[in-house]
Image (cartoon, rainbow, N blue to C red):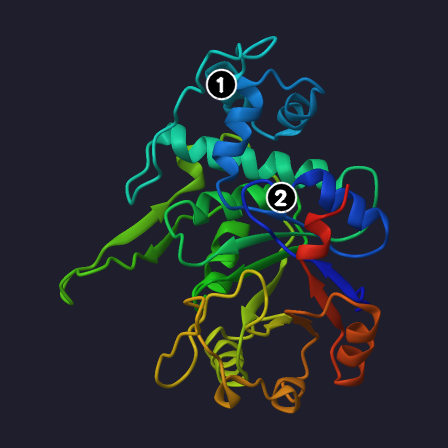
Amino acid sequence: MEYPAIIQGGMGLGISNWRLAHSVAQAGQVGVVSGTCIDLIMQRRLQDGDADGSMRRGLAAFPDQDMASRVRQRWFIPGGRTAEQAYQAKGMVGHEPSDDSLELLIVASFVEVHLAKTGHDQRIGINFLNKIQPPLLASIYGAMLAGVDIIIVGAGIPFEIPALISKLQQHQAAEWKLQVAEAPRSSNYQLCFDPARHMTVFPEIERPLFFPIVSSAALAGLLVKKSAGGVDGLIVEHHSAGGHNAPPRGQRELNAAGEPIYGERDAIDLEAIAAFELPFWLAGSYGTPEQLRTALAAGAQGVQVGTLFAFCE
């Protein structure tokens, strides 16, 4: 399978939006939309009147028009809110989200991916944060309904994601253990999502590729082994990456700016990464032609670049 050399990074809260991903894909590379807070972003676009009609075009393409209509009627303000009018708030997505919250997540993810994919045949990915669990199942499902090509997950260790993707591809109910701070070990909090509770139309879904974001060869090895063949590629992230949040290995030290100090133990063994025989992309200060050549020489397929795209028009 042929892969482009550049994956555009998934920067949250609408920075990596459908327009950016669409432009990158038209240039022949992998465009990525961010799934972070995608429900909030869509409902605010609708409350602002959807001036260019893009949200409504996306809604018109959603396979279950009853659900699309509910979202549109709930949030769309013709002509947009006034400057003095506050946005109508939506509820937080907790461990037992309401049907309205889940449907907004499904539809919002679908619309963002659908718009990014329209008008070309290049790959589009969506980026999620493993640590923000409650919205994830509904968001992944919505993106898959739109035919997303790659699901990229960072900020955690996403062992369970490939199995969840398999269930959602078949429109099956999916359960995911919820990590709850300070909960007793005997507790068993679960996130449960059943597409049949919301959808009346069930189109065929092609399975997307799964690219976890890793910061060490050891973590990559665990994911490849424990995910039962569900890992299709790796984003290998140096600690200088803008979205990096893995702490340094060993004793924690801070510099004068209060930032963690990384050392030799945090270096990534690229030979070990290459030994998995999976395509991989290097991220974190690789946003130059020289660094792209360095990545290719190390056996990488290419690079993932975020910050440079944040400065693009």
The residue that appears at 62% across and 84% down in the rendered structure is: 273
User: Could you say which quadrant of the image residue 63 lies in?
Assistant: top right
User: Quick one: label 1, few (<14), some, or many (20+) residues within 10 Å?
Assistant: many
Corner quadrant of residue 146? top right
| Amino acid bearing label 2 | Ile
The residue singled out by tag 2 in the image is 15
Above or below 252: residue 135: above
Residue 275 x %, y %: 65, 89
Q: CA distance from mark 2 to mark 1?
A: 22 Å
Task: Give the quadrant of the C terminus.
Answer: top right
Q: Residue at x 74, y 65 (%)?
A: 287
Residue 202, can we see it? Answer: no
When the figure is inspected, residue 305 is found, relative to residue 40, above or below; the finding is: below
**Residue positioned most to the front:** 256
Q: Is residue 199 left or right of residue 125?
A: left
Q: What residue is shown at x 56% (from left), y 74% (from top)?
A: 229
Going 72% across and 20% down the picture, which residue do you hit?
Answer: 52
> Is residue 39 at all visible to an observer of this figure?
yes
Q: Which mark is residue 196?
A: none
How dense is the environment of label 2, judged by Cα within 10 Å: few (below 14), some, or many (20 and up)?
A: some
Q: What residue did someone put label 1 on? A: 75
Asked which secondary structure carries label 2, the reply is: loop
Q: Is residue 174 above or below residue 218?
A: above
Percent position (x, y) of residue 82?
53, 9
Circle nearer the N terminus (2, 1)? 2
Q: What amino acid type is highlighted by mark number 1?
A: Trp
Q: Secondary structure at mark 1?
A: helix
Q: Position of residue 286 (x, y in %)?
A: 71, 70
Residue 288 in picture, x, y percent from top left: 79, 67
